[in-house]
């Protein structure tokens, strides 16, 4: 990622765990970083979102991700802990505790 983006994300990056920092450094594109942030529950400041999207403020909640269990494509706002609502309901009904 570019230096301007890294500067905008400095506070966010400083607050990450060592494991999260490693994952963040592995992101090769802005889209990968947005997906990482969404999956890890990392809140990105508006300034960073503007730099990521080239000035167009994009909400991370609109990212399309896949359910960890059934691999269905869902908007991130439709996922809970990385699982779609159908999978979560089925898992809870069967006494399965979802892995976070």
Image: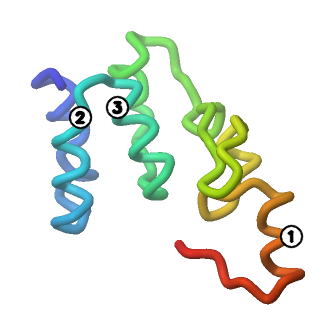
| On-image quarter of the N terminus | top left
Assess disc 1: are there few (<14), some (14-19) or many (≥20) residues with their C-alpha within 10 Å of its C-alpha: few
Q: Secondary structure at mark 2?
A: helix
Q: Position of residue 43 (x, y in %)?
A: 45, 51
Circles 3 and 2: CB atoms closer than 8 Å: yes
Q: Position of residue 36 (x, y in %)?
A: 39, 44
Residues at marks 3 and 1, CA–CA distance in whole angstroms:
35 Å
Quarter location, residue 50: top left
**Label 3 or label 1, whichever comes before in sequence order:** 3
**Label 2 or label 1, whichever comes before in sequence order:** 2
Q: Position of residue 17 (x, y in %)?
A: 23, 68
Task: Check the image and report above or below for 51 versus 81.
Answer: above
Task: Check the image and report above or below for 70 versus 54.
Answer: below
- Dot label at residue 6: none
Q: Position of residue 47 (x, y in %)?
A: 36, 30
Q: Secondary structure at mark 1?
A: helix
Task: Tell me the mark number nearer the camera, choosing from 2 and 1.
Answer: 1
Q: Secondary structure at mark 3?
A: helix
Q: How is the image coloured?
A: rainbow
Q: Judge by depth and name the residue closer to the eye, 7 or 91.
A: 91
Give the residue number, with chain letter if any, for mark 2. Answer: 8
Residues at marks 2 and 1, CA–CA distance in whole angstroms:
38 Å
Q: Is residue 86 left or right of residue 44?
A: right
Give the residue number, with chain letter if any, for mark 1. Answer: 89
At x 16% / y 34%, what residue is drawn?
6
Q: Is residue 63 left or right of residue 54?
A: right
Give the residue number, with chain letter if any, for mark 3. Answer: 48
């Amino acid at each position: 990622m570019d230096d301007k983006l890294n500067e905008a994300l400095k506070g966010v990056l400083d607050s990450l765990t060592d494991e999260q920092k490693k994952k963040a450094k592995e992101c090769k594109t802005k889209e990968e970083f947005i997906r990482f942030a969404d999956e890890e529950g990392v809140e990105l400041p508006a300034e960073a979102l503007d730099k990521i999207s080239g000035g167009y403020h994009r909400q991370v909640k609109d990212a399309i991700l896949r359910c960890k269990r059934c691999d269905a494509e869902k908007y991130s706002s439709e996922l809970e802990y990385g699982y779609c609502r159908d999978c979560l309901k089925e898992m809870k009904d069967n006494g399965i505790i979802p892995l976070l």
